[in-house]
Amino acid sequence: MNRVDVKEKARARELRILNKWSQENTFKKSIELRAGKPNYVFYEGPPTANGAPHIGHVLGRVIKDFVGRYQTMKGYHVVRKAGWDTHGLPVELGVEKQLGISGKQEIENYGVEAFIKKCKASVFEYEHKWRELTEAIAYWTDLDDPYITLKNEYIESVWNILATIHDKGLLYRGHRVSPYCPCCQTTLSLTRWPKAMKMLRI
């Protein structure tokens, strides 16, 4: 039985364990040792890569990690794939702010293709910070082979899912009241509009 050194500083213990897990590939082994076992599928709602992580992101990632580890201990094969949300209004507003432009007309004047390229370049600005946070809190997820929402493979998979839902008669047309941004000339997702309002200073 290993004795616990009660005099060891918490940070030193944390770094020692993280280093041990890294050297021994503990996360990878936890998946490999359960190959052939029933799968437990856990889809992570990915963070927006163009925004810096903060303390508020820690709780969500810790809970996600807890679920994956718990199901692994129950004997399931849990493949945990990281993801990056790389498109949408927050990305576009961030680039508009960088360029000092605002609205559809100014984007068209700048050049839509050039604007899209700028958006794609901006989305991984904070990736290294997300990696640092993820590793610091020992969140076990595959950061080296993530799914990325701007890639055609991902977009096509979403369209395929929508087509399948439609074929089963589960997709319907409805009406709802949505926040609308006159500056962006678009409705705002209910999960995104507070951030967009903050960025627009509305």
Image (cartoon, helix red, strand yellow):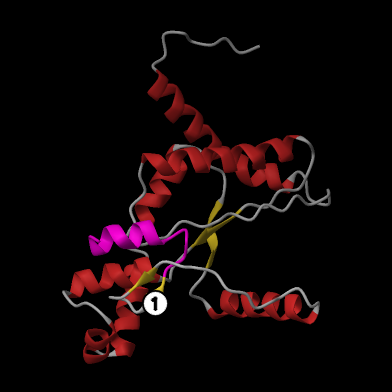
Q: Is residue 198 magenta?
A: yes
Q: Determine which quarter of the picture holds residue 171.
A: bottom right
Residue 25 in view of the camera: no
Point out the image quarter for the C terminus.
Answer: bottom left
In the image, residue 2 sits, relative to residue 125, either above or below, namely above
At a point 58% along the width and 73% down the height, the residue shown is 175
Q: Position of residue 198 (x, y in %)?
A: 28, 57
At a point 36% along the width and 54% down the height, the residue shown is 128
Pointer 1: what residue?
A: 186
Instruction: Answer left or right for 55 relative to 156.
Output: left
Q: Position of residue 31 (x, y in %)?
A: 70, 47
Tell me the amino acid under the disc marked 1: Thr
Element under label 1? strand
Residue 177 in view of the camera: yes
Q: Residues within 10 Å of mark 1 (few under 14, many from 20)?
A: few
Magenta extent: 188-202
Q: Nearer the viewer, residue 151 or 33?
A: 151
In the image, residue 77 sits, relative to residue 163, either above or below, namely above
